[in-house]
Each structure stands twice: as structure tokens, then as C-alpha cells.
Amino acid sequence: MKTIAVPVFTSLSLLLSACGGSGSGDYFNSSYEKRFIFGSQTYICRSERAADDCGGSNQDCSACELESPASVVITQLCVQPVTNTHKVTVNGCVVQLSNDTQTGLCTSEGLRLLSGTNLTRQQVSAGALFPSGSVNIPVGSLTETITCN
């Protein structure tokens, strides 16, 4: 019985060690995420140890990811100063048209539009380009204007 129990126990111990992480006290959890904002930069820490370091007195966020503005989902609604005119910003915004929803972004090239919502700046940057910075969209008997602010 002892000759069978020892190899089984050893194998089980090795398996549990392999699944349990590095043993360095990092406590990695694939669903763990904590954000820290320092000025205009947002850090995403994916382990408790990294979050403790980033949130500590030294603010050592070297083990965390720096959130790129291009990866941020655009959720802000575009301003509509007058009926049927939508002002898009350099940060991007969601344009709610009468019959459609677009996400817009003003760039140095002009106005960029991509149909849909929950899009990132990176995705919208690959959308349709309107170099004039404005586009008129006929909707039935009216015209809706989307323009850079």
C-alpha cells in the first residue's frame, strides 16, 4: 500500500504546485483587475501584488499595463446643439441619428465614422473618412449633419 501511496501523493503534490502559481506570493487571478489613475494615465493591474505596488507609496506600476487611449471604448454621446446637427470631438462620441447609430472621431485627417456602438478609438480610426470634417446624411425629408466640433 505504501509503494502505491507515495508516488500518488508525490504526483498529486506536483500537480497542485503547478496549478497553484509561481509560489512568489503574486496570487495571480485571471479575472483580477484593478485600475489606478494618476493624472491622465490609467494603469490596469492584473494581480494583487502588482496592485499593491501600484497603489502603494512608491506608486510602482511597472508590473501593470498602461491603458492606451486607443483601447478605450467610446461611450460619450455627441452634443446636438441644434436639431439634426451632431458635434463630434477628438475623444470620440456616439452619434444617435434618427434611423441609425454611428460612432464618430475627429482626427487630423478629418471626420471618421463607424456604424455601431461599444467601439474603441482604434476601431473608429479605421472607419469611413470624411476629409472635410463634416457629412450630411439625408433621412427622408430632412438632412442630419455630423461635423467635427
Image (cartoon, helix red, strand yellow):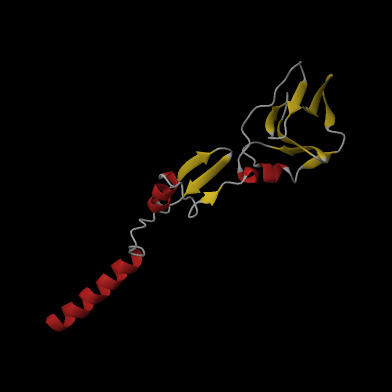
Q: 77 left or right of 10?
A: right
User: Which residue sits at x=68%, y=46%?
Assistant: 122
Seen as rendered, the residue at the extreme front is 58
Judging depth in this view, the residue of 12 and 98 nearest the camera is: 12
Q: 144 left or right of 64?
A: right
The x and y percentages for residue 31 are 42, 50
Q: 66 left or right of 105?
A: left
Seen as rendered, the residue at the extreme top is 82
For the C terminus, the quadrant is: top right
For the N terminus, the quadrant is: bottom left
Judging depth in this view, the residue of 143 and 113 nearest the camera is: 113
Residue 111 to residue 139: above or below: below
User: Which residue sits at x=50%, y=47%?
Assistant: 44
- Residue 53 seen anywhere in this rendered image of the structure: yes
The x and y percentages for residue 107 are 77, 39
Seen as rendered, the residue at the extreme left is 1
The x and y percentages for residue 140 are 82, 22
